[in-house]
Amino acid sequence: MSYAAPLKDMLFVIEELADLDAVAALPGFEDATRETARAVLEENARFVEDVVAPLNRQGDVAPPSWKDGVVTTAAGFKAAFKSYGEAGWQGVQHDVEYGGQGLPKLIATPCIEMLNAASLSFALCPLLTDGAIEALMTAGSDAQKKTYLANLISGRWTGTMNLTEPQAGSDLAQVRTRAVPQASGPHAGAYRLFGQKIYITYGEHDMADNIVHLVLARTPDAPEGVKGISLFTVPKVLVAADGSPGARNDVYCASIEHKLGIKASPTAVLLFGEGYFDVDGQAGAIGQLVGEENRGLEYMFVMMNAARFQVGMQGIAIAERAYQQAVSYAKDRVQSRDVAGSSGPVTIIHHPDVRRMLMTMRAQIEAARAIAYVTAAAYDASHRSPDDATRRQNQAFYEYLVPVVKGWSTERSIEVASLGVQVHGGMGFIEETGAAQHYRDARILTIYEGTTAIQANDLVGRKTVRDGGAVAKGIVAQVRRTAAGLASNDADLAAIAKRLTAGADALEAVVDFVVANMKSDVRAVFAGSVPYLELAGIVLGGWQMARAAAIATAKLDAGDGDADFLRAKIATARFFADHLLSRATGIRDGIVEGADAVMALEAGQF
Amino acid sequence: MSYAAPLKDMLFVIEELADLDAVAALPGFEDATRETARAVLEENARFVEDVVAPLNRQGDVAPPSWKDGVVTTAAGFKAAFKSYGEAGWQGVQHDVEYGGQGLPKLIATPCIEMLNAASLSFALCPLLTDGAIEALMTAGSDAQKKTYLANLISGRWTGTMNLTEPQAGSDLAQVRTRAVPQASGPHAGAYRLFGQKIYITYGEHDMADNIVHLVLARTPDAPEGVKGISLFTVPKVLVAADGSPGARNDVYCASIEHKLGIKASPTAVLLFGEGYFDVDGQAGAIGQLVGEENRGLEYMFVMMNAARFQVGMQGIAIAERAYQQAVSYAKDRVQSRDVAGSSGPVTIIHHPDVRRMLMTMRAQIEAARAIAYVTAAAYDASHRSPDDATRRQNQAFYEYLVPVVKGWSTERSIEVASLGVQVHGGMGFIEETGAAQHYRDARILTIYEGTTAIQANDLVGRKTVRDGGAVAKGIVAQVRRTAAGLASNDADLAAIAKRLTAGADALEAVVDFVVANMKSDVRAVFAGSVPYLELAGIVLGGWQMARAAAIATAKLDAGDGDADFLRAKIATARFFADHLLSRATGIRDGIVEGADAVMALEAGQF
């Protein structure tokens, strides 16, 4: 089953909801016009549809193999990644100084969505590379930037994030990998690293000339916990001052995991400093400190926020792919008569429950996409606005939304992929159909780059309690303004306004509950953290769908735009309001009135 | 990860909620005392824990293979099935006349749950065999009963249900397999069958001496549609009048499917009458008509109701297995400090969101189990009560509940298995952990034996509209009586009563909506059919949990029973009320106020 980029919806969201014109008015983004956006998206769509999408299934069937530390990626991946780099796609949002295109995140984001929809497994390599680029841009020295950035942005090299160790997953305070400074010898000023990292996506592969590992480790005198973690670059192949390749570094891929999904992306166990490769006569992987000692987690957070946003896009992408496949099947499969009567069996898209499933998929995808693109636009404004207050305001909006984009979009993607299987009936359970792959692939998204609980803790702690709920309530106020502005003489908009207001009430009550109880009953607050994130996703998704419906109504009234698309947008917004926003009050009740029940059992009673 | 049967909860539900004593008072069930139930359950638990549970993972890793029409099942399955039969487990609920134990369904049901928790793939073979036994008991001739029942009940032979064809899945009206009566020759009086059946669970295997296929097919002059379908027995090996094995019948396994889950159960494509095996010199599988011509679907429905109930049990079983594995991991894995402060990292069961996930799993499992066992008791009363009105009342209750047991338990099982993966974090995505297998295995349960939409259509049509909502409203009245009887001076019971009353209101409103609109707006009714089923599951689950909480409170007050278990039951009931029942009103809103949005788009707009 092929993939067709949903360009119409993407452009509507970029232009109408995320206000591309305003982004193009920011200093440095003068070229990011509607024409540019359309051209970039169309070109990207052609590339991912033709080159990447066909790899998705074959990479699942014949995933990468490991032998003696060497990983051979799935057929076609190496060539596709070469084309990807040569066409400049790795550089869309990166600095022109290092060969990037310097476009806003608002334009890069749909490109990321498309690549992931074409193949989550393939897209992970650029995703991690983006993270490495962000980290080096933030904290790298000029020499590090010079050595790595152009090669990463061109796609000649790739990047990884080396965080997790067996005892250090969600809790990075437990990182034990050691970095020993070299006082003398050929690597004076550098470090030798020793330790084991697990779950390293594209930690070893054959798709690029070099792999730049960004590794969290502790220097000998580092304090315990998260304040003693530093960040290092550890290239797979050492790089001489003139940029030429040197010796193989002492980082060895001990195995790759046998996973439920995203099978085509190699997930490596990496051993640093085990002496598999001697560098100048001794064990220890040569690494360079990035930024200052003991500030590694801070830099990694820059990278992780970017990566979390992108994993949120993965959720939207896989959901879109699953949706397209389900729609295609539903339009093709003939089974049973219409419930309202028909002369013979009809295609199943005529059956109300199939329709309900497709609408549930569609509504959540469109809502999640709208939230994400609006968040991307806030990121652009937070970096480029000439006005300090505007930058800060957008930064706060962006930071509040990142855990929602990551947590909510990915949770929804599992549901959407599961509905995709369901629409197929028995065929969905047969691997050859492909629907099951999406269900398997999506399942990682709520786990890596911080589980949903980690996102929710971030939403509760750093994003809500720290400012006493100010940003959260500012957003609720915006939601209310949208609800109040919906024309009461339009049946759809009035119905949406009613649900959106109830949603805003629910979200505000939860924000108040969180802020009020954080000190007095922290367990009660965290007992509701994931439901809070779910509620935020529903209400903010409903908000963006309401904005979309209002704009679509106005455009229809003005005879402007694609009437069929606009009417579908209104109907989808209405569905979202009636079937998803309508659940907001129940979620509020569980959080505000149900916290005690979560912790009522003793651990021993389970 | 091993499995330990939750005997304490099973016995509580059997004795306190499903009223085993009342079942034991029914004619013919005099032996079904508490002592018998406990002994049978304990013995069954030992068997499945020791013999079957260890096969679950290895059957997934090394599933059955197909070669030239012969299927070799996974290692250990054949021996385990032999033990299963010899120990008499296939016969628990079947007629003593044919070698069964003649125990009530209320006692057989926990045994079925345990077997499925040990291995869904393994349990499917007995499940289908049970279906074949039911069908033959219902409609088989004396000769057919004599030929088949003792062999099926002893586990020497197994049974299958041959319904689906490529064009006939949910819609059996499209069945095309032909059954041609033999007027003369060695098979005079029998039929020769020709056609292709797909998705035949255990349609071919090496675990028994013979396989009795129950096949839907059309005789030459049969009317079109569902009224022209007859049911046939087609044994893999023909059986002589004296019971001795004869020629290989002309049914050939053309392939087995490559599936997402339940990999150890072979899913066959069967070809009837293709001449792979000539029987007496010509092609055509020899079959015997079961019951009367053209009444096949009616008989099959008996079998399907039994099978649907059992698939509901599969949902509860896999959910329980996933829950046990998650609890075990959560008690073992150390990561991050307690949110309320701790000197070091703690086991993750101390983290509120892990607790929320475990409670969500547990509460739904306990509620689904309670609904199912109460339904089983109604089945027993519907068959054995000496009072006609009581029989009819229980039959109506049973029939209303079957689609809820099947649809709701299985939908929940997917969520529970997914939460099980989530509790494991990154480990959950690695196949070796085993959590991912439950997530894959559970995914079939909402599809086979009628998708959730088919269950919901049954709930709407045959079970609600046909009697004008009388049975549904009778059940709602019972729910209200339970809510009214909960002590208002007990904080937990009062909170549960509030949610249960709101749930009853929501369910009643939906029943009214369904009955009122079936004629005027059939699409609107079916647009809400699956949400109606979801709501029924939540409200009836909440009802049983409320009953359980009331009983547990009374027992605690009386100083009777296991205090720790009873307190946990109350806490779990409270969780169910606050976090699941609290969503009832939102679901109602979507059904009653949101039907138009489901069908608003044209098919072409997708």
Image (tube, coloured by chain):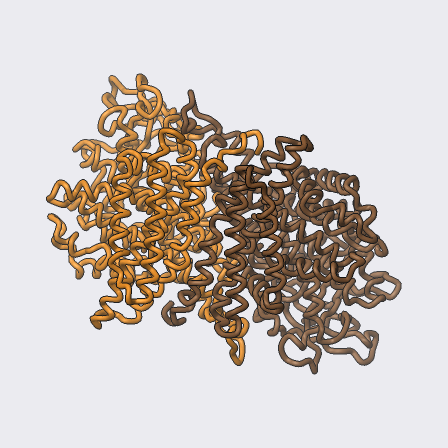
Chain colours: A orange, B brown
Where is residue B585? Give x, y as percent: 46, 54
Q: Is residue A530 visible?
A: yes
Where is residue A135? Give x, y as percent: 25, 36
Residue sitting at the far front? B489
Where A22 sits versus A94, above or below?
A: below
Where B340 sits versus B571, above or below?
A: above
Where A9 sits versus A511, above or below?
A: below
Residue in the picture at 11% in, 43% down = A387
Residue sitting at the far bottom? B221
Q: Nearer the viewer, residue B281 or A350?
A: A350
Position of A218 compared to B326: left or right? left
Question: Total marks drawn?
Answer: 0
Residue in the picture at 23% in, 46% down = A154
Q: Nearer the viewer, residue B476 or A577?
A: B476
Residue sitting at the far right? B242
Where is residue B465? Give x, y as percent: 58, 68
Instruction: Specify the quadrant of the image occupied by residue A331.
Output: bottom left
Quadrant (top left/top right/bottom left/bottom right) for the N terminus of chain A: bottom left
Q: Is residue B69 visible?
A: no
Instruction: Specify the quadrant of the image occupied by residue B405.
Output: bottom right
Position of B139 compared to A365: left or right? right
Position of A37 compared to B307: left or right? left
Where is residue A474? Give x, y as percent: 25, 44
Instruction: Specify the quadrant of the image occupied by residue B301.
Output: bottom right
Residue in the picture at 78% in, 57% down = B385
